[in-house]
Image (tube, grey):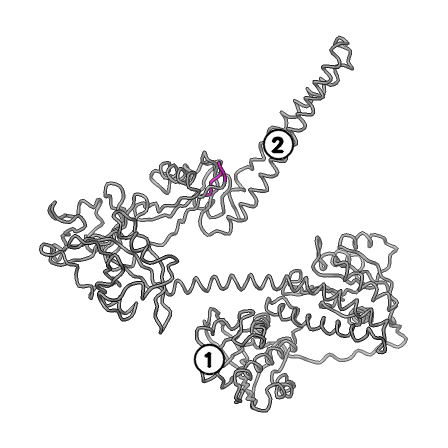
Amino acid sequence: MSSVSDVFPSRSGRWKIDRGRYVSLALIAVLLSLFPFLGVLPHQLNAGVAAVGVSFLAVLTFALTRAWVISQIEAQTRAALLVFLEQETDACIVTDSAGEILVANAHAASRLINGINPRLEECLRSVFANPAAVLLRLQALAQAQGKAEEDIVTRGQTIPVSVSRLSHDRLCWRFTLDAPQLWRNVHLPVVTVGRNDVVLDANGAATDLFGQVPKVLKQIPRRDAAADDNVVRVATSGGDRTFAVSTLRKSGIARELLLTPVRDVKTEQKAASFADLPVPIMRLSTKGEISEANRLAVELVGEIQPEQTNIEEIMQGLGYPIRDWLAHAAQQGAAPRSEFLRLARKDKEVFVQVTLSRILKDDQVYLIAVLNDATELKTLEAQFVQGQKMQAVGQLAGGVAHDFNNLLTAISGHCDLLLLRHDQNDPNYGDLVQINQNANRAAALVSQLLAFSRKQTLRPEVLDLRDTISDLIHLLNRLVGEKVRLTLSHDPVLKPVRADKRQLEQVLMNLVVNARDAMPEGGEIRIETEVLTLDQPVSRDRATVQPGEYVTVKVIDSGVGIPADKLQKVFEPFYTTKRTGEGTGLGLSTVYGIIKQTGGFIFVDSIQNKGTEFTVLLPVSAGIQTPQPAVPEAPGEQRPHQGEGVVLLVEDEAPVRAFATRALRLKGYTVLEAESAEDALKLLDDPNLSVDVFVTDVVMPGMDGPTWVRQAMKERSDVRVVFMSGYTEGAFGEAGPEIENSTFLPKPFSLTQLTEAVFQQLN
């Protein structure tokens, strides 16, 4: 990724340039300090010259240190700014008050900047006709107000520009170079005019009306001077026509004008009947009463009563009183501004973009409201915000679960050590068992968080879902109770899938339990499996299922159903339709995380009072599971016994390291401890040190577990490895550790699980 930082030298380069000068001054100071020892000065001056030299050297040392510190701070600031700017989709540039470019993102570097050490004004000459005036105007506003923005209109293009003041001599500029043309698809004529009524742009309807884009607005013939200034007559192929001119938007010196056809201008200058206009338009009073609305406006906002319905009754969500918005738009010279509002419709959710323009009729001020259906835009915006929120929650859940697993490992591990010293007759034995059981419950909750964040460790295997569900059906029958009947329907030629059996069983149990809770009076739950073949991609619920073969598992109930407005929220963490205390809201989010991590999809359909259907799609596995033949032990081969061997334990968490060390030593193993990968490699530098097993954490400060193990195994290829971690995605990725003779032990683990893992590796 290229950026301006690759082209322009850092300002810390001044430190490098001035270093020679600093060295010269330092030599002079040293010479002054040595003069008294050379014997070339009178004895009375020696002390004074030495003091001057030492003082000069101290001041110079301070100045040199200060210059170096400032250069390091500025370099770090530039790097942080560049990381932030690279996340923006617009061209972003940071300059000083003189216009010198300091930092720019890759988009600005590729679109605007050409040459070495350019100034911002020079970079914009190919974009704006007079960039110096634009920059000076916006910079003055930003220095006074902290921020300024303006839409700069050039011929055929509108470029939104904004500038923010970062400090007294630092400014951040943003240029939206690919801004969409707002009125390009509107069927009414819209022209953009600049200084002296020069026409800068015109949409397709205006070009068709005039035959060509006029150079200046004055080329459009106007009525006599006594006529209202916002009404013009235009010569068209069908004869002269009259239009009312409304200002849609004003930015800087540019204005966007809407030409609305009117009839019989000489008599009453009445607005044309809106019924046939190709865009939704309403005429409002300054208080918001709807005087007229055309057919498209009625279809968009719903039924209204002219002169009775107020816009406040049908629109909401502006963020401040709608009457203030109307009053501002009714002021003479006010710049029109588009607002997004939500319609108060009961049948569906609709968002509209409303632009108000001031007109005069019979010496009375009215407002023209041009409406655009913005439902799809707001839906996409909501989906994007939801996606960001879900990603942030997933990252937070994964991080919390990882750290919490370390705490649980230390708690349950030391509890196991205490249980070894207490029998069932001890009065403290029951308390220790309670601690152990609650630690296990906490571990189960952490497992749900890891499943949602998709950072759990899966052990996939090739499965036949018929066998998996059959093994689980007895437990499911006990879960649903006596009022609910559970039925199965399998595809006779069901193909295998590759998944973690334990996690897949959790998915089925969660779905069946939710179906049971949706039928308090009883009913039937059907589990159906079949093979689905897709020849082309299928898009649904913001997901795209690629062509291929899938095994589908459907869990269908006849319960109360899920309301349509809540249907897309059921997979969010901590969201539940149950009452307080009846559920954590983690069940379906856990299901979602497991299915997505397995490479599948899950969809939900529901009709209130009819039932709900969850559909799980899992890719068909190409491999076939074959049992591995048992390898007989060679006669005379000696296997290590429990407690025989040297273990190198590498763990950065001190409580976990202390428990693991004591547990392994209790079993008789010789344990070497290291709190980091670097310390472990130092221990292994001793060629006389013999180690049988590495037990290492995966994620550690500095070098991670797989990295240091690969380096150590270059010299000790026969050593066995036990990796342990709360989750492995941070270091392993999707491919796993890819280290021979290694196994994985998920946290939290018990004393028995740890010693058994080491024993299995030694054997």
Residue 433 visible in rendering:
yes
The span shown in magenta is 167-172
The residue positioned 24% from the left and 66% from the top of the image is 308
Residue 718 visible in rendering:
no
Side of 232 relative to 556 (left or right): left
Query: On the image, which quarter does residue 731 sit in?
Result: bottom right
| Residue 266 rendering spot, x and y as whole percentages | 9, 54
Screen quadrant of the C terminus: bottom right
How far, Cα to Cα, is label 1 from label 2?
68 Å
| Residue 242 rendering spot, x and y as whole percentages | 14, 55
Q: Was residue 448 drawn as part of the magenta stretch in this picture?
A: no
| Residue 609 rendering spot, x and y as whole percentages | 45, 84
Mark 2 burial class by Cα count in 10 Å: few <14, some 14-19, many 20+ = some
Side of 269 relative to 703 (left or right): left
Looking at the image, residue 201 lies above or below residue 597? above
Q: Predominant secondary structure in magenta? A: strand
- Residue furthest top as drawn: 42
Type of amino acid under label 1: Ser
**Disc 2 marks which residue?**
67
Side of 476 relative to 173 (left or right): right
Mark 1 burial class by Cα count in 10 Å: few <14, some 14-19, many 20+ = many
| Helix, strand or loop under label 2 | helix
Type of amino acid under label 2: Ala
Side of 455 relative to 758 (left or right): left
**Disc 1 marks which residue?**
606
> Is tag 1's residue or tag 2's residue first in the polypeptide sequence?
2
Q: 539 or 591: nearer the eye?
A: 591
Query: On the image, which quarter does residue 365 sit in?
Result: bottom left
- Residue furthest left as drawn: 267
The residue positioned 79% from the left and 78% from the top of the image is 631
| Residue 633 rendering spot, x and y as whole percentages | 84, 77
